[in-house]
Image: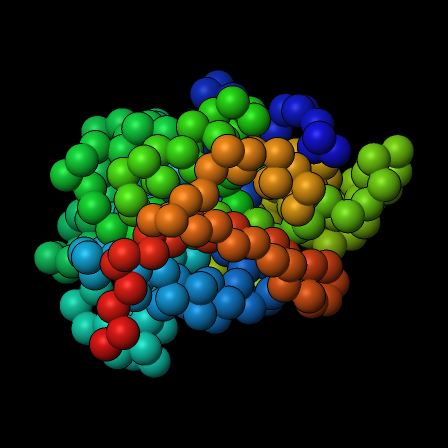
Amino acid sequence: MKRIQLFEFEDFSWFPDGLRECMTRFIMAMHRLLGTKEELAVLISRALLHSKEKKIIDLCSGSGGPMLEVRKILEDKYDYKNLELTLSDLYPHPTMAALINNLGDPNLSYLNTPVDAANIPNDQQGVRTMICSMHHMSPDVARKILKDAEDKQQPICVFEISDNSFPRGIWWIAFPINIITTLLITPLVRPMTWQQIVFTYLIPVLPILIAWDGAVSNARTYTMNDLDILLEGMGSDRYQWEKDTIKGKPGNKIYLMGLPKDRLDAG
């Protein structure tokens, strides 16, 4: 595989929650800038046609992601009314879980109990989504996640905002570029907090953290060929896999979808 296993600061349990939330808000701004929610809505609307349950189970949700906005697009543009969305994580984020669960929306929840993406409980049926999170998984774990979806005949949509197209020897060139990008994009972060400003411009911790994690995320992303290796021996008359690159600027994105063949709902 081209993918290499490195660490990201957000992987560590000791990493300060305050900085983690600042980084999450920055990533959300990146998603909005890159048009991620619209691209995800197209993919997930297709996956929902292959699901008996009109429900999305977002895996590795952490302290947030674009799925709340994606759900709104699916309801408004694709006519999936009262679409159920459940956020989950192996290490649920207590603040985000409380915020989501206190909104009073019966079709929106964040599970407080740990959810292993490689062994989803049988009572959680629906389209599984992994947004910019599969690259955190080792090949063994990633394969188990994909196999669990196929074995249980559940649709899955894996999405990454990089395609690991840089030659391996120069992946680190992205580090200084990411520092400049962080400084330029931070004004677009919402909600803006004093911590975001202070730790970006006065005490520039966030540009370094975001630049490192961004560069490493690309190096850890599974390429198209890597995905073929993960999928060896999978696929059948009942389940199909598809993957592709979404061309864009400043870079390409990739997706992988697993779809049960016998659950296509034409209506």
Residue 99 drawn at (x, y percent): 24, 48
- Judging depth in this view, the residue of 25 and 81 nearest the camera is 81
Residue 117 drawn at (x, y percent): 36, 33
Q: Is residue 118 left or right of residue 247?
A: left
The residue that appears at 60% across and 45% down in the rendered structure is 198
User: Which of the 4 image quarters holds residue 29?
Assistant: bottom right
Residue at the far front in the pictured view: 237
User: Which of the 4 image quarters holds residue 189?
Assistant: bottom right
Q: Is residue 257 visible?
A: yes
Q: Quadrant of the N terminus?
A: top right
The residue that appears at 24% across and 43% down in the rendered structure is 110
Task: Describe the colour scheme in one phrase.
Answer: rainbow
Q: Quadrant of the C terminus?
A: bottom left
Q: Is residue 226 left or right of residue 234?
A: right
State whether residue 82 is above or below residue 3. below
State whether residue 56 is above or below residue 93. below
The residue that appears at 48% across and 50% down in the rendered structure is 241
Residue 80 drawn at (x, y percent): 24, 72
The residue that appears at 27% across and 56% down in the rendered structure is 262
Residue 50 drawn at (x, y percent): 30, 60
